[in-house]
Image: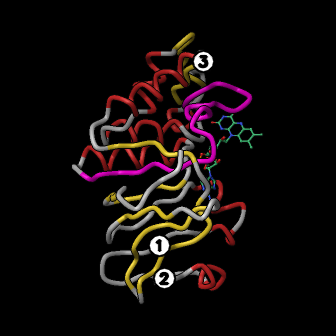
Amino acid sequence: MKTSPSDDFDLAVVGGGHAGVEAALAAARLGCRVALLTHDPAKIGAMSCNPAVGGLGKGHLVKEIDALGGLMGRAADRAAIQFRRLNLRKGPAVRASRVQVDRAVYARAVKAALRRQAGLRVLAGEAVGIWLDGRAVRGLILADGARLAASGAPEAINSRTLSRSRRKLLAFCGHSRMHVPQEMHRCSST
Ligand SMILES: Cc1cc2nc3c(=O)[nH]c(=O)nc-3n(C[C@H](O)[C@H](O)[C@H](O)COP(=O)(O)OP(=O)(O)OC[C@H]3O[C@@H](n4cnc5c(N)ncnc54)[C@H](O)[C@@H]3O)c2cc1C
């Protein structure tokens, strides 16, 4: 889907992985007009090889997302096949909750939640730069040359892209000050 100059959002979230979905939903719940820009919307909600949510390393994260009103725990409940409490024979410090889910049901639940959320639009595309007007952020520059206006709000990023490649860093930019990585400067324009 191409964007047009008439599209105007408060916030553009780049990346429709688990992090981007939660960021977009959280901002929309707060009343922002949100664009969730991702390479392939069909892959939203896709799980990795082992469709498990929770566990020792990430269970606390799922519970924190849930406590903040996020989607992951609710989508996992909807798609659940088996709930387990891990390490019950060991000490409390190493116990955790984990649920095995049906990956197709999970992905459908995530997509449905995005569709239901008022103020949120999912757009297909690749962000290649930050659209600047002087030092003010106007939005994003997409790979097909289109521009996505996101007036004065920061972009969010997906954590995996950030950890994999700092060159893809799009955030952080804010209302009154911003930091644009060196390699992004060539994309700026007025
Ligand atoms: C092989 C493998 C196996 C794994 N197994 C498990 C597991 O069993 N259990 C588990 O809990 N975790 C597992 N993980 C980790 C889990 O997949 C990640 O922690 C999680 O997907 C990270 O979510 P994210 O939203 O941060 O990033 P991602 O899932 O990487 O999502 C990033 C999204 O942003 C899009 N994107 C990136 N750059 C741009 C751009 N410039 N413009 C537009 N869109 C963009 C990408 O297309 C992608 O859709 C595994 C990871 C891998 C690689």
Report x, y in % for residue 22.
Answer: 43, 43
Task: Give the residue furthest to the bottom.
Answer: 134
Left or right: where 40 falls relative to 25: right
Which of the two residues, 147 or 24, is positioned nearer the viewer here? 147
- CA separation, marks 2 and 3? 39 Å
Q: What stretch is highlighted in magenta?
A: 32-54
Residue 40 within the magenta-colored segment of the rendering? yes
Q: Is residue 189 above or below residue 155?
A: below
- Give the amino acid at mark 2: His
**Dot 1 crowding, Cα within 10 Å, few <14, some 14–19, many 20+:** some
- CA separation, marks 2 and 1? 6 Å
Which residue carries the number 2 mark?
A: 179
Q: CB of mark 1 within 8 Å of CB of mark 3?
A: no
Which residue carries the number 1 mark?
A: 172
Query: What residue is at 69 percent from the left and 72 percent from the top?
Result: 167
Which residue carries the number 3 mark?
A: 104
| Circle nearer the N terminus (2, 3) | 3
- Give the amino acid at mark 1: Phe
Task: Give the residue furthest to the top.
Answer: 81
Query: What residue is at 30 percent from the left and 46 percent from the top?
Result: 28
Q: CB of mark 2 within 8 Å of CB of mark 1?
A: yes
Secondary-structure class at tag 1: loop
Query: What residue is at 56 percent from the left and 29 percent from the top?
Result: 53
Report x, y in % for residue 4.
Answer: 44, 56
| Circle nearer the N terminus (2, 1) | 1
| Circle nearer the N terminus (1, 3) | 3
